[in-house]
C-alpha cells in the first residue's frame, strides 16, 4: 500500500470507529423538559420533516403545564444512542416484568414485547409486522412512561429481542443437548431502534401510569377531538356509482323504516372520473350538487365524499398541480407534494369552492397507505426535496391537515375517514378504517388505537349470516364511528330481516348514548383521555407488573390479566364492552376490581374476577362500573341539530357514590375552543344510605337538555 493511501485508510477507520462509538444520552445531549413530564432530546441532525411537523399539531400547552410531574422517568444513563452509516440507533432498557404497548394500529396483538416491527405506512397485510395504516412510533411501558420517535422514516423496532454481549441481565447459558428448557429466543433486556436518518427527535412522556403518559402524548399532539354531534350518529356509505336519485331513495327507505341516519357517504361516482380523481362533480349523476346538498342538510343529512388524492389528467386541477407533484404517478394520477404551501393552497381553494362551500360536511381519504405495487416507490422524488419514503409516512397526515384547516377557517367542525395516519393525528377529526375484514381483529385494532392517539372504526360492510351481521353491528355502535360501508355490497341495516329489530335497537341505542359519548370525547379534548381504550389503562385492572409471572396458580383473574386482553374494551369511564363474534355463544369477561353491573338490567355482575356470559344474540355484553352515571337521550333518528333540545334520562348503576361531568356545546362549531361550552355535574350521594341525585351547573354555556330524570338501574337490595 502506498503511503497516502495507507494514511487515508487509517483516517477512514478512525472516523468510522468514532462514529460507531456509543453515547449514553446524558453526557451526549441533555434531555430538555418542554412541559412537566414531557422531555425532548435531539440526536444528530434529523430531517426538517418529521411526523409532528407534518401533522400541524398545536400542543395543548396550557393543560400540559398544569399536569404534575416528578422527574425523568428513565435512567438517562441507560439510554444509549449513536449514529452510523446514515442511521441513528437508540437503545432503551427493559425490566424483566415490563410490557410494552402501542406502536400503532396493529390488528392481532397488544403486547409488543418480543416483536420486531418495521413501522411503515401500508395496507395491513394480516401480520403484525409494523406495516399498517397508522404505524405510530409511540409506545407506552407498563412501568408508566411513553416514548415517541418522531421521524418520518421506516423505523425498525426490536422490542426485547436482541441480546447484547454487554447486557446487564444476560440470559442464562443453556445446552440444547441436555436442557429441555432451552429457548431459541433467549431473554433480552432492551428495546433497540434503528431510524434510517442521520439524527432523530425523541420524546419521553412521564406517567406515573400508562394512561397519564398517553394523556401527555395526546395533549402534546394537540389533544383529542370533539366530533360534531351529527358525526356520532349513524353513517351509511352508498354503493359506487349511486346518483342523486339513488341517494334520495336511500334516505327515504331509512325514514320509512325508522332507522337512524345522519351521514350519507358517497363512494366513487360523484367525481366525473375516479382512480385517479378529478374532484369535479359528475354532471350526469349529480347535476345539481349545491341544491342537492342543501336539500339533504335541511333534512338533517350530512354528506361525506370519498376521494383518493391522485389527480386525473382529465380534471382542471391537473395542470395547476403538475409542477408541484412528485416524479411518479398512481393510476396515472399525479401526487401533489403537500409539504409545500402552494399545492396545499391550490387544493384547499378547490375543495372550498366546489365542495365545502356548497355544504359538504367531510371526506373519506382513501388509498394513501399502500400497497407498494400501486403507490410511488421510495425512490420517488418530490419538489420539496423530501423523498418517497418520507412522503409515504406523512401523506395521510398532510391530507388530513389541509382538510381540517379548511373547516377550521369556516369555524365548522368536520368528521371523516382516512386510511393512513401517523403520530400527531390525535387532533385530526378523522377515523381510520380499512378493507381487512376480520371482526375479532377489528376489535383488537380498536383497543390498540387507544395507545397511539388515533381513532378506528370496525365498519360493517357485508356478512355471511344474520348472526355475523348483528354481531358486527353491535360493536360498530360502540366505536368512534357507527357505519355501514355498502360501497361494494349495497347492504342496508335491514339486509338481514331476521335481525332487523335487533339492529334497529342498537342503532337507536347509539343515538341515545349521545350525551355520554359526547362527554367522553370532551375528556379526549380537555384531558387527552382516549375515548375507546384498552383494559390495561383502566383503574382497578391489575397490570402485568402487579403479579409475579409464576404466581398464576388457581386464580383465573390473575391468569387473565397476565394475558393479552384483546377482545374487550372501555368506552369512556364507565362502560365495559365485551363483544361476541359469529358462532360464539358464550365468552369470558375480565371484570376489573370494583363492583360491575349489567348495562341492560342493572344487576350485579362481578368484581375483580373472570365471569362467563351467554348473552343471546340480541345482546352485546356491556357492564357499568359501580356508581356509573350514563346520561342518555330518547331514541331518535337524527342527532340533535343546532339549538335542538332533548330530554335527558340519567341512568345510575350500583351503590357507590357517582359523579359524571356532562359536557355540551353548540355541537358543530369550534367555539368551544374559546370557552363557549357548559359542564354540568351529575352526582349521586350515598352518604345517607340511599342514593341522592343532584344536578349542578359547573360551567354555564350552551346546554341542550331538559326534563332531566334519573333512573336507578340497580335494585337497591343488591350489593
Ligand atoms: C377502497 C376502500 C373502500 C371503498 C373502495 C371504493 O379502497 O377501502 O372502503 O371506498 O375503495 O373504491
Image (spheres, grey):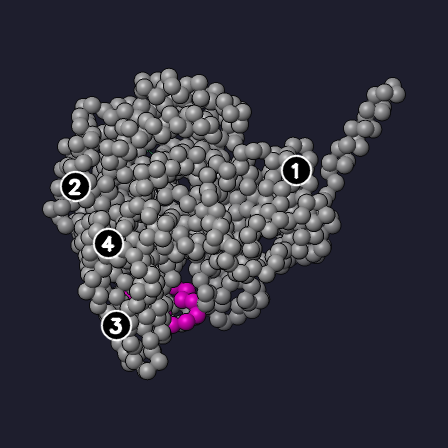
Judging depth in this view, the residue of 562 and 206 nearest the camera is 206
Tell me the mark number nearer the camera, choosing from 3 and 1.
Answer: 1
Q: Nearer the viewer, mark 4 or mark 2?
A: 2
Quick one: which residue is furthest to the right in this view? 3
Residue 470 on the magenta span: no
Residue 674: percent from the left, percent from the top?
A: 37, 49
Distance CA(mark 2)–CA(mark 3):
38 Å
Quarter occupied by the N terminus: top right
Q: Earlier in the sequence, mark 2 or mark 1?
A: 1
Residue 694: quadrant of the picture: bottom left
Q: Residues within 10 Å of mark 3 (few under 14, many from 20)?
A: some
Tag of residue 44: 1
Please, what secondary structure does the residue beneath circle 4 have?
Answer: helix
Mark toward the start of the polypeptide (2 vs 3): 2
**Which region shows up in magenta?**
588-599
Mark 2 lies on residue: 298
Nearer the viewer's eye, disc 2 or disc 3? 2
Residue 550, position as x, y percentages in the image: 58, 66
Residue identifier under label 3: 712
Cα distance, mark 3 to mark 1? 60 Å
| Label 3 CB-ligand 1 distance < 8 A | no
Q: CA distance from mark 4 to mark 2?
A: 19 Å
Q: Are marks 2 and 1 in contact (CB under 8 Å)?
A: no
Regarding residue 54, the answer to whether it shows in the image is yes
Q: Nearer the viewer, mark 1 or mark 4?
A: 1
**Distance from Cα at disc 3 to Cα at disc 4:** 21 Å
Q: Residue furthest bottom?
A: 688
Q: Residue at label 4?
A: 511
Amino acid at each position: 500500500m502506498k503511503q497516502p493511501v495507507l494514511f487515508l485508510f487509517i483516517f477512514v477507520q478512525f472516523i468510522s470507529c468514532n462514529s460507531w462509538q456509543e453515547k449514553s444520552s446524558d453526557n451526549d445531549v441533555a434531555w430538555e423538559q418542554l412541559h412537566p413530564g414531557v422531555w425532548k432530546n435531539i440526536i444528530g441532525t434529523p430531517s426538517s420533516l418529521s411526523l409532528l411537523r407534518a401533522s400541524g399539531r398545536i400542543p395543548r400547552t396550557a393543560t400540559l403545564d398544569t399536569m404534575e410531574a416528578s422527574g425523568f422517568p428513565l435512567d438517562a444513563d441507560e439510554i444509549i444512542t449513536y449514529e452510523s452509516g446514515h442511521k441513528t440507533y437508540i437503545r432503551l432498557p427493559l425490566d424483566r416484568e415490563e410490557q410494552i404497548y402501542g406502536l400503532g394500529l396493529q390488528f392481532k396483538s397488544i403486547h409488543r414485547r418480543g416483536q420486531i416491527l418495521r413501522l411503515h405506512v401500508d395496507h395491513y397485510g394480516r401480520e403484525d409486522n409494523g406495516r399498517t395504516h397508522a404505524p405510530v412510533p409511540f409506545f407506552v411501558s407498563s412501568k408508566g412512561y411513553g416514548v415517541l420517535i418522531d421521524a418520518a422514516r421506516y423505523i425498525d423496532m426490536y422490542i426485547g429481542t436482541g441480546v447484547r454481549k454487554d447486557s446487564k441481565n444476560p440470559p442464562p447459558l443453556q445446552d440444547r443437548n441436555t436442557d429441555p428448557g432451552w429457548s431459541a429466543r433467549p431473554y433480552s433486556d432492551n428495546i433497540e431502534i434503528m431510524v434510517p436518518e442521520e439524527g432523530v427527535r425523541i420524546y419521553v412522556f412521564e406517567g406515573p401510569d400508562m394512561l397519564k403518559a398517553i394523556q401527555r402524548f395526546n395533549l402534546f399532539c394537540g389533544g383529542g377531538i370533539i366530533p360534531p354531534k351529527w358525526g356520532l350518529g349513524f353513517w351509511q356509505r352508498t354503493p359506487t356509482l349511486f346518483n342523486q336519485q339513488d341517494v334520495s331513495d336511500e334516505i327515504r327507505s331509512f325514514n320509512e323504516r325508522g332507522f337512524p341516519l345522519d351521514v350519507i357517504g358517497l363512494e366513487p361516482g360523484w367525481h366525473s372520473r375516479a382512480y385517479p380523481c378529478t374532484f369535479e362533480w359528475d354532471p350526469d349523476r349529480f347535476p345539481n350538487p349545491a341544491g342537492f346538498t342543501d336539500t339533504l342538510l335541511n333534512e338533517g343529512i350530512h354528506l361525506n365524499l370519498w376521494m383518493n388524492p391522485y389527480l386525473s389528467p382529465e380534471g382542471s386541477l391537473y395542470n395547476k398541480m403538475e409542477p408541484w407533484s412528485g416524479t411518479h404517478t398512481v393510476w396515472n394520477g399525479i401526487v401533489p407534494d403537500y409539504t409545500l404551501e402552494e399545492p396545499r393552497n391550490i387544493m384547499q381553494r378547490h375543495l372550498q369552492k366546489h365542495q365545502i362551500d356548497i355544504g359538504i360536511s367531510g371526506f373519506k381519504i382513501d388509498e394513501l397507505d399502500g400497497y407498494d405495487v400501486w403507490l410511488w416507490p421510495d425512490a420517488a422524488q418530490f419538489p420539496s426535496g423530501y423523498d418517497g419514503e418520507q412522503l409515504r409516512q406523512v401523506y395521510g397526515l398532510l391530507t388530513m391537515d389541509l382538510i381540517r384547516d379548511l373547516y377550521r377557517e369556516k369555524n365548522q367542525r368536520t368528521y371523516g375517514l382516512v386510511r393512513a395516519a401517523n403520530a400527531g393525528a390525535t387532533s385530526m377529526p378523522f377515523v381510520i378504517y380499512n378493507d381487512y375484514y376480520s371482526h375479532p381483529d377489528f376489535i383488537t385494532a380498536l383497543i390498540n388505537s387507544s395507545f397511539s392517539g388515533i381513532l378506528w372504526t370496525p365498519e360493517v360492510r357485508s356478512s355471511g349470516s344474520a348472526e355475523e351481521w348483528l354481531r358486527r353491528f353491535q360493536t360498530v355502535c360502540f366505536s368512534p364511528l357507527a357505519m355501514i360501508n355498502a360501497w361494494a355490497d349495497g347492504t342496508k341495516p335491514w339486509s338481514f330481516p331476521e335481525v332487523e329489530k335487533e339492529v334497529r335497537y342498537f342503532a337507536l341505542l347509539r343515538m341515545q348514548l349521545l350525551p355520554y359519548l359526547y362527554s367522553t370525547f370532551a375528556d379526549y379534548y380537555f384531558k387527552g383521555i382516549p375515548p375507546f381504550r384498552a383494559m390495561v389503562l383502566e383503574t382497578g385492572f391489575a397490570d402485568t407488573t402487579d403479579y409475579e409471572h409464576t404466581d398464576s396458580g388457581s386464580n383465573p383473574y390473575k391468569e387473565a390479566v397476565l394475558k393479552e386482553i384483546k377482545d374487550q374494551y372501555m368506552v369512556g369511564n364507565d362502560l365495559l364492552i365485551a363483544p361476541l363474534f359469529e358462532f360464539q355463544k358464550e365468552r369470558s369477561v375480565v371484570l376489573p376490581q370494583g363492583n360491575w353491573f349489567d348495562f341492560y338490567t342493572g344487576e350485579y355482575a362481578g368484581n375483580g374476577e373472570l365471569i362467563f356470559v351467554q348473552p343471546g344474540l340480541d345482546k352485546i355484553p356491556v357492564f357499568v362500573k359501580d356508581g356509573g352515571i350514563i346520561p342518555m337521550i330518547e331514541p331518535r333518528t337524527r342527532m340533535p341539530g343546532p339549538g335542538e333540545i332533548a330530554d335527558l334520562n340519567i341512568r345510575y348503576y350500583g351503590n357507590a357514590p357517582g359523579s359524571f361531568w356532562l359536557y355540551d356545546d353548540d355541537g358543530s362549531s369550534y367555539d368551544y375552543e374559546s370557552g363557549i361550552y357548559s359542564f354540568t355535574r351529575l352526582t349521586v350521594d350515598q352518604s345517607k344510605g340511599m342514593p341522592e341525585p343532584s344536578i349542578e351547573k359547573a360551567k354555564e354555556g350552551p346546554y341542550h337538555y331538559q326534563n332531566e330524570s334519573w333512573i336507578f338501574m340497580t335494585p337497591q337490595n343488591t350489593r
